[in-house]
Amino acid sequence: MSRIIYNYKINKITDHTKQIRELDLQIISHPEFKFRAGQFVMLHVPQTDENGQPMKAALRAYSIATTEHDLQKFRLIFKFVDNGVASKYVWGLKGDEILNFTGPFGKVFFQEPPTEQIVFFNTGSGISQHFCYLESKMKQYPELKYKMYFGLRYEEDIYYREELEALKKQLPNFEYHYVLSRPTEKWTGKKGYIQNFLPEIDYKNTPTTFYLCGNGAMIKDVKHQVLEVDGFDKTRFWAEAFD
Ligand SMILES: Cc1cc2nc3c(=O)[nH]c(=O)nc-3n(C[C@H](O)[C@H](O)[C@H](O)COP(=O)(O)OP(=O)(O)OC[C@H]3O[C@@H](n4cnc5c(N)ncnc54)[C@H](O)[C@@H]3O)c2cc1C
């Protein structure tokens, strides 16, 4: 069975940093497209052979970064990968192209009813899935204790501060921390890997759900500590690896 290919126009391109580009997209075919917070779409990256003839598209997964309450639009956050097929395509976009997607896919949903505390660990562009949960669920669950640890390398990699501050204004118990693995000496915030900050989270006594997204090595480390060492409930631990 052939899958439906959904066409999107680009409303806006935002370069948050040298390596993070966000596309604001709007559907122009099949308005019935539906997704749930936590899902991803497959971008069809056009390919040509050495004679410039069209070949089968290359498919790459991207997590929807915005609310499930507006199904006609979504934003995607891309992290640049050296020599990457999709990266080259996305960073070459001018804004007048039509993008093709299939989907939605994925089963990492926000668990309901939620626990008192929600912990988000993300690296690179992994905030996309978690931002989508927050935007989609904040009105329904404004009182939860949301804690986000956002792992990046350098100060210049920091992005989404404004967006996270805006969430903070609406969610009294939302806190977020940038954790930089290679900051300059001037950095007074958290340093190292996000997994090093597990001991400051009270997940042993407070009903908690973990959501992890991004780097596979980070996910493996946190999983080892939380599930294997601490024996935490597997049904309250959800992860999506991007690599
Ligand atoms: C479920 C899912 C959701 C995803 N959501 C997002 C998202 O929201 N935003 C996003 O930016 N990416 C996301 N990804 C990753 C994305 O699908 C691509 O793998 C990524 O953009 C690289 O594609 P590319 O074509 O540019 O590189 P490729 O041509 O596939 O790879 C080029 C080279 O880079 C290496 N490489 C591939 N991916 C990575 C990586 N992530 N980090 C470092 N090296 C890598 C490859 O091994 C290869 O050597 C997701 C992946 C999955 C599985």
Image (cartoon, grey):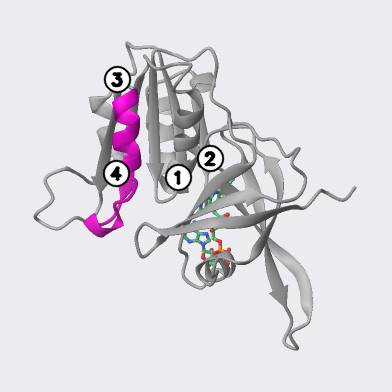
Q: CA distance from mark 4 to mark 2?
A: 23 Å
Q: CA distance from mark 4 to mark 1?
A: 15 Å
Q: Secondary structure at mark 2?
A: strand
Q: Main secondary structure of the magenta part?
A: helix
Residue at (44%, 36%) from the top-left corner? 131
Front position in the image: 167 or 195? 167
Q: Residues within 10 Å of mark 1 (few under 14, many from 20)?
A: many
Of label 3 and label 1, which has the lower sequence position? 1
Q: Which residue is the site of mark 1?
A: 126
Q: Position of residue 237 (x, y in %)?
A: 49, 26
Query: Is ligand 1 closer than 8 angstroms to the Cβ of mark 2?
Result: yes
In the rendering, which numbered label is found on residue 173? Answer: 3
Q: Which residue is the site of mark 4?
A: 161
Q: Position of residue 40 (x, y in %)?
A: 61, 43
Q: Are marks 2 and 1 in contact (CB under 8 Å)?
A: yes
Instruction: Give the amino acid at mark 3.
Output: Asn
Q: Which residue is the site of mark 2?
A: 240
Q: CA distance from mark 4 to mark 3?
A: 17 Å
Q: Residues within 10 Å of mark 2 (few under 14, many from 20)?
A: many
Q: Are marks 3 and 1 in contact (CB under 8 Å)?
A: no
